Amino acid sequence: MSISLTPAAARHVEKSLAKRGSGIGLRLAVKTSGCSGFAYALEFVDAMTADDQAFETHGTKIIIDSRSLAMLDGTELDFVREGLNEGFKFNNPNAKANCGCGESFAV
């Protein structure tokens, strides 16, 4: 099982953690939501729980709970800028379909 970050995503997470002043990494989770069934959830993590697994890429930790891990295995998290917009892009090999707005997916 693995989750990875591109160098751009790792830099963005590290800058955000530094600006926040605390945190050990970024939690990537899946929640039931959206028009395709599931949505990605991101939040900063101050402490891991017994249910968490951590993956480190480019010196940055991504923390995943065991329920989300099966749907996120192999996912690469990127941070992209397109024109005036910027944000995380999820390259999830488990996603069979994505909604038009890009906020939700189906497995």
Image (cartoon, grey):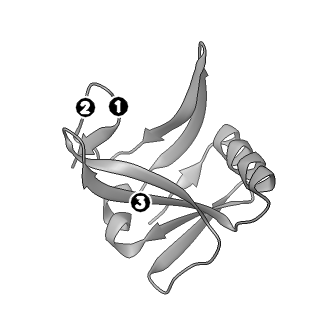
Please tell me whether mark 2 sits on a helix, a strand or a loop. Answer: loop
How many discs appear? 3
Mark 3 or mark 1: name the one nearer the start of the chain. 3
Callout 3 touching callout 1 (CB < 8 Å): no
Callout 1 touching callout 2 (CB < 8 Å): yes
Query: Horizontally, is 51 left or right of 18 in the view?
Result: left
Q: Residues within 10 Å of mark 3 (few under 14, many from 20)?
A: many
- Taking the spot 51% from the left edge, 75% from the top edge, the residue there is 53
Percent x, y of residue 21: 80, 60
Percent x, y of residue 95: 28, 44
Q: Residues within 10 Å of mark 2 (few under 14, many from 20)?
A: some
Looking at the picture, which amino acid does disc 2 mark? Cys
Please tell me whether mark 1 sits on a helix, a strand or a loop. Answer: loop
Query: What's the distance in space between the residues labelled 1 and 2, CA to CA?
Result: 5 Å
Looking at the picture, which amino acid does disc 3 mark? Ala
Query: What's the distance in space between the residues labelled 3 and 2, CA to CA?
Result: 18 Å
Residue at which label 1 appears: 102
The residue nearer to you, when weighing 31 against 91, is 31
Numbered tag placed on residue 99 in the rendering: 2
Query: Horizontally, is 9 left or right of 20 in the view?
Result: left
Residue at which label 3 appears: 29
